[in-house]
Amino acid sequence: MRIDILTLFPQMFDGPLSESIIKRAQAAGLVEIHLHDIRDYSTDKHRHVDDYPFGGEAGMVMKIEPVAAAIDDLKGQRHYDHILFMTPDGERLCQKMSNQLSLAGNIMILCGHYKGIDYRIREHYITGEISIGDYVLTGGELAAAVVVDSVVRLIPGVLSDEMSALTDSFQDNLLAPPVYTRPAEFNGWRVPDVLLSGNDALIAEWREQQAYERTLRLRPDLLGPDTSAPSAKPHRKKNM
């Protein structure tokens, strides 16, 4: 997979893209992530990329020319499966969306800034708009880093245990069950006996039940409108 990120502040990605799983995925050649400074496409001698909005609204707006030039330049080099724009009024990021994006070959992500971006970019270039929540950030960089992390970890070979991603929260509209590690007892707090039993069938049943009960208690919206009937309980995919 190749991910191209268009931004006014490439340095904001130094930490998120150069550590942990994302770093290892790039080193292994499983993903290429390229940062592009939109200011490099400005024809203004001062590299200005913003201007006042028509209509007199407060704030500044990213100009259409440098953004269009950057997108056209990259599109001239390769085909993109998705050209995404990070915006608070986009579609809410979810696990299903990350799963779908992880199957793509080339993705371009545009990070907005200031009051917003000339809307003609969104009308004529963008194929998908993503939000990470109902709040406003200074720019799209942090949100883009979240999308990249959620997608890259799903690429085959990125995680040492690929089955781990299949049991993450939200994969089957369920939250993940509780997890424990050694020691089996700490300050009198014991790990559930079933996890120490060695009985794989009982452990799998316990995890499924815990996932369902946690979802019902914390995120009942994931289970649909009717969570009282026994048939409402979903089942996790079995690892093959």
Image: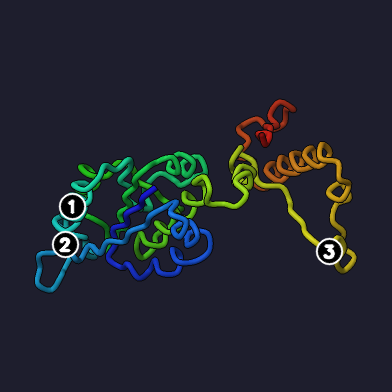
Pointer 1 residue: 73
Q: Residue furthest bottom?
A: 46
Position of residue 10 in the picture relative to residue 45 (left or right)? right
Q: Give the side of residue 45 with respect to residue 26, left or right.
A: left
Q: Are marks 2 and 3 in contact (CB under 8 Å)?
A: no
Q: Quadrant of residue 145?
A: bottom left
Residue 114, how many percent across, how many down?
27, 64
Q: Residues within 10 Å of mark 1 (few under 14, many from 20)?
A: few
Which amino acid type corresponds to the residue marked 1 in the rendered image?
A: Asp
- Residue 138: quarter of image: bottom left
**Residue at image location 15% in from the left, 70% down from the top:** 47
SS for callout 2:
helix
Q: Which mark is residue 41?
A: 2
Q: How far apart are labels 2 and 1 at the CA level?
A: 9 Å
Q: Residue at x 84, y 56 (%)?
A: 191
Dot 1 lies on which element? helix
Q: Amino acid at mark 3?
A: Pro
